[in-house]
Image (tube, grey):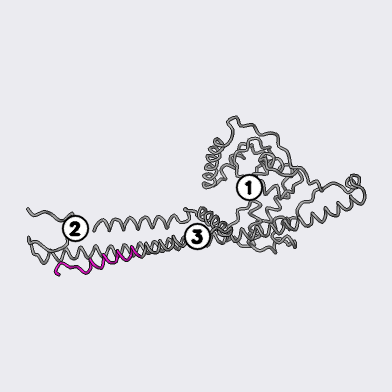
Amino acid sequence: MGGFDFFHLFRFMLAIFATAYTLIGIGQFAWQWRRDSAAAGRGEALMRRYLIVQFLRIKTRRFLWDLLEIAALLAVLFYLVGRH
Amino acid sequence: MMSETPPELPSAATSAAAAAPRSLSELPLDELRRYGQDLGLDLAVDLPQGETLRLVRQRQELMLELERDALLDVVVWLREPVRKSESKEALVRRITRCTRVRFEGLSERGLHAVARLRGIEPLPDEPRADLERRLHRAETLWQKVRRKRREVMGGMIDKLLSPPDGEAAGEYHFLPEDPAARSLRTQIEDEGVVGGIARRLRGVADDYVREKLDEIEVRIDRKLDEIDRRLGEWRDREVSNRLRIIKITLVVTILVALLSLSYDWAKSRVGSADAGPGGSSGAVLRPSERTAPD
């Protein structure tokens, strides 16, 4: 048992749980959207189109600073992961 | 005889409270701002009511000062479909939508009207080219970029959709005037006394109903626009919150990665200290640091 490392086990389990949690969350979200948007009624169709229009109207410039911060954080994260 | 809109009152078609005419000072700030923006004013959202009111009144005074013929010249140049009897306010609304900065074919008085509506006062005896240059310079960078982008897109789509031998624009014609404007005498001559009077009364009632329906439609449209604007704000807030959550998640992930890296580093240091100088250690080394024994 001399080579056994609890921190490595913790790190591995954390990665597994975090990935599973994220995938389940995204899957649930996508399924819910698919279910809601697949309804064939007139109201749902209107809402669907309206949401698409709202989505297309998002102005990237308004969130440019946030997106840049996220890009910088991602760069730092990839660097740190690469150092392992 | 044309009647102009009184300066104190927004036109019935534009005022959300057209059912009961109100003076400008009684309008809520959002309606006042919308009214001013329809007249071509650039009103910031945080502009106080008093200042907004002053600017709107200033614009109404300007509308009264502008010549109707000059405004008609501009709408003909823009080839906007209007009736010749349209009110000045309606003409100004059409004109302020235009963002062109090339004025070939526009009369001198029309150019002056456009300049004044864009907030540039023409100087006495100012050459046309200078005034056009000033109008050109008045554009902000973003307006310029937007205009150029539209020009490029317009050119591309025009090439795709228009026939190669594109026909030249024909002569401009105003829209026909309202046929209901015939005189009672003409109607009686055409349809007899009873028929003429009945048609006139029916016409008046129809006009009234139509006007009311138009007003209701305008109010509904305005409310829908308001709902749309608020939904847009809510969407932006939601996107902003989601991005914040992503940032927090990334920061936490970076902290965990740093912790992990520090742990590896500390462990390798401890392992090398335990092994002593020159000895082999049980420390975890990075693959790049592992070397085969000689």
**Magenta span: helix, strand or loop, mainly?**
helix
* Residue receiving disc 1: B97
Question: Of helix, strand and loop, which one carries label 2?
Answer: loop
User: How far is mark 3 from mark 1, CA to CA?
Assistant: 27 Å
The quarter of the picture where residue B243 lies is bottom left
Q: Residue furthest right?
A: B193
The amino acid sitting under disc 2 is Arg
Q: Position of residue B208 (x, y in %)?
A: 79, 57
Q: Nearer the viewer, residue B12 or B28?
A: B12
Mark 3 or mark 2: whose residue is earlier in sequence = 3
Mark 2 or mark 1: whose residue is earlier in sequence = 1
The residue located at (75%, 58%) in the rendering is B212
Q: Nearer the viewer, residue B45 or A67?
A: A67
User: How far is mark 3 from mark 2, CA to CA?
Assistant: 44 Å
The amino acid sitting under disc 3 is Asp
Q: Residue furthest top?
A: B165
The amino acid sitting under disc 1 is Arg
* Residue receiving disc 3: B236
First to last magenta residue range: A1-20
Q: Name the chain under label 2.
A: B
Q: Position of residue B74 (x, y in %)?
A: 68, 41
The residue located at (30%, 56%) in the rendering is A78
The quarter of the picture where residue B54 lies is bottom right
Dot label at residue B53:
none
Q: Position of residue B95 (x, y in %)?
A: 66, 46
Question: Of helix, strand and loop, which one carries label 1?
Answer: loop
Q: Is B31 on the left-hand or right-hand side of B252?
A: right
Q: Name the chain under label 1.
A: B
